[in-house]
Image (spheres, grey):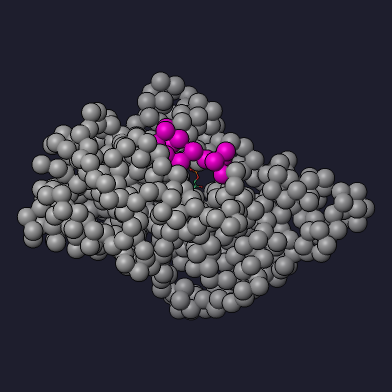
Amino acid sequence: MTTLVWFRQDLRTGDNPAFHQAAMQGPVLPVFILEDPSQSGETHPLGRASRWWLHHSLAALKAAVPGLVLLRGSARHLIPHLAAKIGAKAVFWNRCYEPHAIERDSDIKSALTSSGVNARSFKASLLHEPWELQTGSGGPYKVYSPFWKAARQREVAAPLPAPGNVEIQAYDHGKVLDDLGLLPKRPNWAGGWERIWQPGEEGARKRLHTFLDEGLDGYSSLRDRPDLANVSRLSPHLHFGEISPRQVWHEVCERMAAEVRLADDGTKLLAEIAWREFSQHLLYDFPKLPEDNWRPAFDAYPWRESTEDLARWQQGQTGYPMVDAGMRELWQTGYMHNRVRMITASFLVKHLRLHWRHGEAWFRDTLVDADLANNSANWQWVAGSGADAAPYFRIFSPITQGRKFDPEGHYIRRWVPELRDLGTAHLFAPFEAPQDALQQAGVELDRNYPLPMVDHAKARQAALDGYEAVKRAG
Ligand code: FAD
């Protein structure tokens, strides 16, 4: 009897419990459904960069699982319909944790069960389920350190191999990938991204191995340097489930065991995987995380509204080179280094006092790793309104941050080429540079590079003044 396997954010064959279990039972019909938000109830739809990634990830999965059926429409309707049509006695999938997915999946499970179909879901995207990792008194963790302390003591199950010789049931009524309309057309702003990224399981595996060979050594101290290659760039692969956190965990542990000097670096990487886990658990326990302040006192913050200022931030035209470099890296590659995400996000919410939701929406649209839990948890972390958040009054100076984390200015020169010839002493604050230094470097402020849109000291003070309202409300 055929088992329907519904692929979602688990676009891989290895360590895929739903696929593995189904393949052991007999013939499999693998299916992926592209849902429209109006049908799925999704409040935060896939962004454009994510759609580009998804197209290529599905192409890779289809190459690995040739019978993969692609459909478009409502999963609530299509899954029970397809199961009935092929006479499937079971439907398996791996769990997702976004609020709309939980609701949708439980509706589908009820519908299948009531028509006698065995509906089973599996743990595949997380190391530990939110209900498996709780505080001593039984509630969810709200602070990262004890969460990590508890998480690192738990055993992580060994990853499953990809199933061999899977018997795939033929089904001829799927769509061709291009008909899903995921790729940008005119203009094709993602031109060249194939050279930067290799979506899919093989690309994920290669990325992990390149990182383990070339980036892990020094990770704990160099992961804050956007000018260096000491981060893994695994985030889009993890988001789309082309690699599982269990696979990453075990490979890192093996490397640490083989090379003892990598113990600190490896542990730091595992701690970052645990941040991902912490965010997913937060979203599970606080489904309003993408919309509402986790700390309600922040409802009192006097946010500004300015579409013009938001656009300057989005376009990397703030006049602060470190901020502009990050925003342009994001636009041109679909990725931004974590340290620079913190700097650019802080600039939006504190220097410009624009709501973190504007930033969340822009990142969701432009990041290839856009992830509802990680994105909203991190935006709230930067804004001060989140769980275990950065204290609000610690306001990053984009100038000092640049000097500290891009000391030779390589990152800025790469993404803000109009400042390429400016000496490092002036690179982080060109508006403070003497006229002759600017002239020699061909920089004309307000002509080929903007003047700063706000004064750092004044903006900092205005942000702190705004925070008084939060203090009163809290
Ligand atoms: P590495 O340093 O190599 O880390 C390995 C993995 O650990 C990452 O792939 C990621 O899965 C996880 N991780 C690392 N840092 C964090 C973190 N702070 N929170 C949660 N998980 C983490 N990450 C996303 O995956 N999607 C997002 O939409 C997203 N939005 C963000 C928005 C803001 C404002 C900020 C400050 C951070 C955001 N992050 C997001 C977290 C982090 O910036 C990225 O996960 C990281 O930069 C990805 O690069 P990497 O894979 O090279 O990271």
Q: Is residue 239 magenta?
A: no
Whole-percent x and y of residue 282?
34, 58
Q: Assign the N terminus to one quadrant of the image.
A: top left
Whole-percent x and y of residue 415?
69, 48
**Where is residue 182, by image quadrant?**
bottom left
Q: Name which residue lies at 20% across and 40% down.
A: 169
Whole-percent x and y of residue 130?
27, 53
Q: Assign the C terminus to one quadrant of the image.
A: bottom left
Q: Name which residue lies at 25% across and 35% down.
A: 157
Q: Could one spot residue 246 in this view of the protein?
A: no
In the figure, 216 relative to 38: above or below?
above
**Most foreground residue, 118 or 180:** 180
- Quick check: 405 left or right of 299? right
Q: Could one spot residue 455 in this view of the protein?
A: yes
Residues rendered magenta in the picture: 193-205
The outermost residue toward the right is 436
- Quick check: 367 left or right of 2? right
Q: Name which residue lies at 53% across and 68% down.
A: 358
